[in-house]
Each structure stands twice: as C-alpha cells, then as structure tokens.
C-alpha cells in the first residue's frame, strides 16, 4: 500500500495567515518558516546540537535552529517560498493571487505522492 498525505487544511480549503499578512498552507509550514527567520536563515547561527533522541518533541524544541535550517535546505519547496516570500504576503498580493500562484500549485502536486511530499507534511499530517 502506498502512503498518502491527508492534509486537513487542504481538505477544508483553509490556509494559515499570520498577523503580518504572510500566507502559508498550514500552521506547520508557518511554524517551520517562522523558526528559520528567528535563527537568521539562510545563515545558521551558533547554537550547538544537543544529544537528544531525534524523534522527541524535546529535540524539536532544543535543536530548533538546526532542524529549521535543515528542513529548508532539504526541501526545495521551502527554499522557493523563502526566496519569493513577499509574493505570499497580503500586503503585496490578494489572497486569490497567492493561492493561484505556481508555488501553491507546486505544493498541491507535491503532496499527491509520499515520495514528493515535503518532509513537514510527512512528519505532521495524517497518513492514509
């Protein structure tokens, strides 16, 4: 049986809009990208990795810098979002323009199969 992502935001036709007008497909994308901004992506800071089980929530909290940068570096769809971030902000574009953008279309296509789905979707969304 092939694994598939079941995205509750997508199925409900919802998105995440931050107070600054930034539009994300869901809260998991928003949180990941927020962390990258806090840690100055694309330049990694100097917070050392801690030796904690990589699957634990504690690891995600204590190693958030490395995890955030790694997620971006290993997912072209995140890199594209960061590169064109202003295009996904309500100060610059309408919600329709944002949701009709190539980036959101590419994400929708990427989620169709397990192999092409972004890691954040594989980690946090329901798998059927």
Image: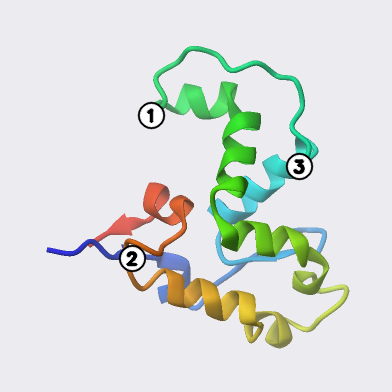
> Which residue is rendered at x = 18% and y = 64% of the image?
2
Residue that mark 2 sits on: 6
Q: Disc 3 or 1, which lies upstream in sequence?
A: 3
Residue 76 badge: none
Reply above or below: 92 against 64.
below
Residue that mark 3 sits on: 41
> Which residue is rendered at x = 75% and y = 20% of the image?
46
Using residue 126 as the reference point, say whether residue 11 is left or right of it: right
> Which residue is rendered at x = 47% and y = 51% of the image?
120
Dot 1 alpha-carbon crowd within 10 angstroms: few under 14, some 14 to 19, many 20 or more:
few
Q: How far across and down, in percent of the image, does residue 124 sit?
A: 41, 49
Q: How far across and down, in percent of the image, does residue 22 sit?
A: 75, 64
Label 3, label 1: how far apart the Cα atoms are:
23 Å
Using residue 101 as the reference point, say whether residue 56 is left or right of it: left
Tell which of 90 and 37 is nearer to you.
Answer: 37
Dot 2 alpha-carbon crowd within 10 angstroms: few under 14, some 14 to 19, many 20 or more:
some
Q: Nearer the viewer, mark 2 or mark 3?
A: 3
Tell which of 95 and 50 is nearer to you.
Answer: 50
Reply above or below: 67 against 47.
below
Residue that mark 1 sits on: 55
Label 1, label 2: how far apart the Cα atoms are:
21 Å
Residue 47, quarter of picture:
top right
User: Circle 3 — which element?
Assistant: loop
């Amino acid at each position: 049986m092939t694994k598939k992502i079941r995205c509750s935001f997508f199925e409900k036709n919802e998105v995440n809009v931050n107070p600054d007008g930034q539009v994300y497909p869901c809260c998991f994308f928003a949180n990941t990208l927020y962390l990258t901004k806090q840690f100055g992506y694309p330049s990694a800071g100097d917070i050392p990795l801690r030796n904690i089980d990589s699957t634990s929530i504690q690891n995600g909290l204590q190693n958030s810098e490395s995890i955030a940068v790694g997620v971006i570096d290993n997912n072209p769809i995140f890199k594209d979002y960061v590169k064109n971030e202003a295009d996904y902000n309500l100060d610059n574009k309408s919600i329709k323009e944002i949701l009709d953008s190539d980036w959101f279309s590419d994400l929708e296509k990427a989620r169709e199969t397990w192999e092409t789905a972004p890691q954040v979707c594989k980690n946090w969304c329901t798998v059927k």
